[in-house]
Amino acid sequence: MADENVRNLRDGTITLKDAGANTLELVVDTGDLSWVETSNITDIKDRQRLSHMRLGEEESVTLSFSLKYKYSVANGSEPLSPYEVFHFQDGAAAWASTNDCGDVKTLDIKFVMVDPCSTGEDETVLFRKVPLPGITFEEGDEFNTMSFEGKAFITKPSIYRGTTTTTTTV
């Protein structure tokens, strides 16, 4: 039996944000989120015996999510699709990349899981500088599904718990 008090995307939102004031909030019906943080540890030996460990090269965190969504709300006059935003095209052509160096365009992605039992105890997971390596979109009779697989130009996400007004500065 599922725990009714679990924070997850069932009661959450996903916000896509550019470097300016543009945002697209996806109200999630059902979804999932996963990420992998990698720590490269190098064993240092002294005369063929383990001596100590050192941190190796940093790796970008990988993330994936999929969601069924009801509708999207944009801050412009017409709602944008997530597809347009991820590709910086059509209504999102003027969005500014969060990557200030290089030719890869990125967005910040914020996941907010609302606490179903307590006001002000929402959980926020923030990934900065996320480029678009892959999207899978499936249209359906009852709902649409979008899946995303990629990486963020960070070693781990920022995770906060508290009121959304104090944790949503992206």
Image: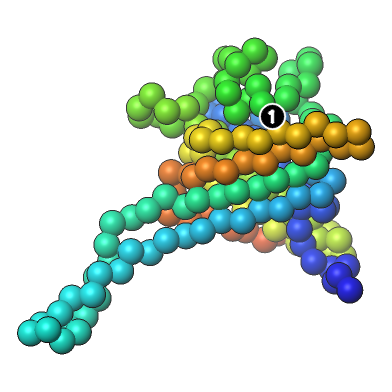
Q: Is residue 73 above or below residue 32?
A: above
Q: Quadrant of the rendered structure where residue 103 is?
A: top left
Q: Quadrant of the rendered structure where residue 53 is?
A: bottom left
| Residue closest to the eye, 62 or 140 | 140
Describe residue 89's horizontal placement relative to residue 37 as left or right.
Answer: right
Residue 107 locus on image (x, y percent): 55, 33
Which residue: 85% across, 71% down?
A: 3
Describe residue 22's horizontal placement relative to residue 47 as left or right.
Answer: right
Most distant residue in the left direction: 47
Figure coloring: rainbow
Q: Is residue 137 visible?
A: yes
Residue 72 locus on image (x, y percent): 79, 30
Which residue: 23% across, 75% down?
A: 43
Q: Quadrant of the rendered structure where residue 44 is?
A: bottom left
Which quadrant does the N terminus fall into? Answer: bottom right
**Element class at badge 1:** helix
Q: Residue under circle 1?
A: 82
Residue 55 locus on image (x, y percent): 28, 66
Which residue: 76% across, 50% down?
A: 31
| Residue closest to the eye, 120 or 38 | 38
Count of all numbered marks drawn on residues in the image: 1
In the rendered structure, which amino acid carries the disc numbered 1?
Pro
Residue 90 locus on image (x, y percent): 65, 13
Which quadrant does the C terminus fall into? Answer: top right
Q: Is residue 159 above or below residue 45?
A: above
How packed mark 1 is, by other alpha carbons closer than 10 Å (few <14, some 14-19, many 20 or more), is some
